[in-house]
Image (cartoon, rainbow, N blue to C red):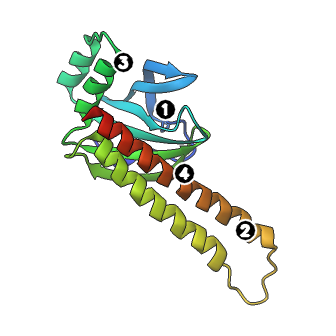
Amino acid sequence: MNLDSIVVREHSPWLPNDSASDLDVWQADDVPVLGTFRMADDVVLFVAMMGVDNGSYTYWGYVPLTPTEVSDAANLVCDSMDELWTHVARYFDGRQVIFADATDFELDGMKTEFSSEKGMFKSLIQHLQWATDYYRQRAGAHVAGPTVIGARLSVSSLVHPALEEFERADHAEEQIDSAKRLLASLS
C-alpha cells in the first residue's frame, strides 16, 4: 500500500481520502477517535493521538493492517481502555506509519512518514518536533515572503496567516510536553 495515498488535505481524519470507506469506529468522543476504514483491499487503523479533548488542532496516526491483524482485531475484547490502547500501540511498533495534523477535524495535508521503531508515542514526539519547526518556517514565510515591489498588501494579509502558523507551532510544542508526560506514565 502506498502510504502517501492515505491522507488527503481537507478530508476528515477518520475518512481521510475519497477512496476510504467502511468506517468501523472502535471509540468515539464526539467524533471517531479510534477505528479502521477500508481502502480497496486494505484496512487502515486510525487513531487520534492528541488534541481531540482540548482544542481545534489534532494529531492523527495511521497504519495499514495485515490480514492477520484485521482478523485479530475483529476478535479483540479488552477489559479496559488502557488494555485497548496498549493493543493499538503494538500495531504501530516497528512499522512505517503516517502522522497527520488537522484543524477543526479537517486534515491540513501535512503528512510525514516515520518508522516507529521506538514506539508510537516516541514517534509522535518526533512528528510534533518536526511540525513545530515546519509551522514556524511557514509563519516566517508569511512575514518575509511577499517582497514584490509595488505590491499592495495590507498588514492584516501578512500578519493573520503568520499568527495562525505561530499559534499552530506553539500548540505542537505544547503537545510535545503532553506526549512526553504520557510516555513517562506508560513506562
Choose the circle earlier in sequence order: 2 or 3.
3
Circle 4 residue: 171
**Hey, what amino acid is under mark 1?**
Leu
Quadrant of residue 104 in the image?
top right
Mark 1 falls on what kind of element?
A: loop
State which mark lies toward you, 4 or 2: 4
**Hey, what amino acid is under mark 4?**
His
The residue positioned 38% from the left and 52% from the top of the image is 127
Between the residue at mark 2 and the residue at mark 1, the CA separation in whole angstroms equals 33 Å
Quadrant of residue 126 in the image?
bottom left
**Hey, what amino acid is under mark 2?**
Val
Between the residue at mark 1 and the residue at mark 3, the CA separation in whole angstroms equals 23 Å
How far across and how far down the image is residue 25, in percent?
44, 19
Quadrant the C terminus occupies: top left
**Crowding at mark 2 (Cα within 10 Å: few <14, some 14-19, many 20+):** some
State which mark lies toward you, 1 or 3: 3
- For residue 159, which numbered disc appears in the image? 2
